[in-house]
Amino acid sequence: MSILAWIEDQRKLKLLNAPKYNHPASDGSQGLWTRCDNCGVILYIKHLKENQRVCFGCGYHLQMNSQERIENLIDIGTWRSLDETLSPCDPLEFKDQKNYTERLKEAQERTGLQDAVQTGTGLLDGIPVAIGIMDFNFMGGSMGSVVGEKITRLIEYATQEGLTLILICASGGARMQEGIFSLMQMAKISAALQVYQSSANLLYISILTSPTTGGVTASFAMLGDLIIAEPKALIGFAGRRVIEQTLQEQLPEDFQTAEYLLHHGLLDLIVPRSFLKQALSETITLYKDAPFKKIGFIPYGIQKNISFITEEKLRRKWKEWSQDLFKKDKFEIVPFQNDHQKIINSEFVYREILLSFKNIFNIFSENFLKNLDSDLFNKAIFLANQEKIEWRAFYTDKNGNLKSNFLENLVTKSFLNEKLKYQIKK
């Protein structure tokens, strides 16, 4: 080794071992002022948040985190998160400049999230919806295995409960640190959406914000029944530079913007952020009241093992309702529909009961719960932890016709229906 090569190696080694300077956050989460990404005007962050992070000078839509979007879209006090404790792991033991686990820990501490998406249910102008919101501040909103799993579980929950599904996309694509595991999420989410849209015939609204690129664009972002985008949002698959180098052509200035995609038929609407909640509310109301509806069905389903959080919630509800049980002479049905007479002898009675855990508790409490041992609930919890419940709503008879006698037997022939008739008549 020459002296010059040795000196160069020592210089590089010294740079690697030097203490690193942590730059202050430039995303506007700290400090009082920020700059518009489009026109460069200086903006006061407090006023910017009040204006839903829309620039006062040019109307450009700056990035919002997932919590701010929840506060702007969901009615106050109605948000219920799903799978909030689901956390990613490092199956490939990936390492670049940092370990993948270190990057995850830093992103979790900075954003307060477990991964790049928040999923849950809530009321949008009084309308129950299932909503998933991606957060670009968490590793660029990249889609890993946890993001795919949470969105898939949200779609399955919305399918079983008959809720309108809204997904707000803000992502750089699949997460490279998880390799093929992140790419598998594209097919998994698309398969869940196929059941939701084609079998259950429910409404899925996709909202594209800036940026929406890569594997997210190639999967669920473009599968919506209605695709809405924010003004001037960056939407695409590959980067502009890659496409220009591949085609050896100069692309238009507005290429991969929401306006360009709307002009070429890839979007349905461009809605400013200030009108988004009202637009969603009116769209869902119009869909609900539309004529010539086609009733859907769920071809199959799986009731998974309950989590520790769900178990604790059930235990608290059981204790509360058990105390109220001995204060009442007769059980009461919590009304789900206003006109009970129209749903007698129909599968809507079955749905009304199953949509309320308290209804099930009240119905069976009078004849069963008082006479059984006190360890009944613990046995039920143990069974729910050990077993998965799988079902098919329809089966085929000898002639190839679809049958659903399970619902008919439950509603028309069981003593449960007789008790419902008796209570509703009274």
Image (cartoon, grey):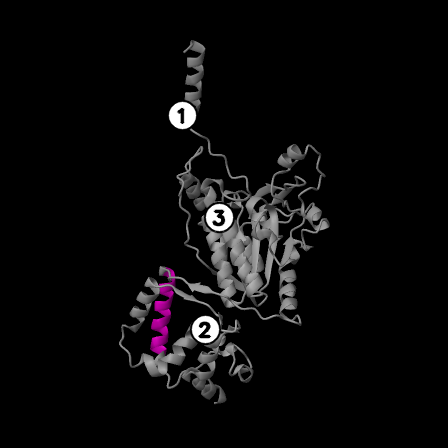
Q: Given the current orientation, which residue lies at the most extreme top position?
A: 3
The residue that label 3 is drawn on is 184
Amino acid under label 1? Asn
Most foreground residue, 393 or 114: 393
Q: Which of marks 3 and 1 is nearer the N terminus?
A: 1
Q: Could you say whether the residue bearing mark 2 is in a helix, strand or loop?
A: helix
| In-image side of 361 versus 246 (left or right) | left
How far apart marks 2 and 1 lie (CA) works out to: 62 Å
> Up-down: is 98 above or below 266?
above
Q: Residues within 10 Å of mark 2 (few under 14, many from 20)?
A: few
Using the rendered view, name the quadrant where residue 249 is placed: top right
Labelled disc at residue 354:
2
Q: What stretch is highlighted in magenta?
A: 309-324
- Residue 327 in view of the camera: no
Amino acid under label 2? Leu
> Up-down: is 145 above or below 327?
above
| Marks 2 and 1 close (CB-CB < 8 Å) | no
> Up-down: is 143 above or below 326?
above
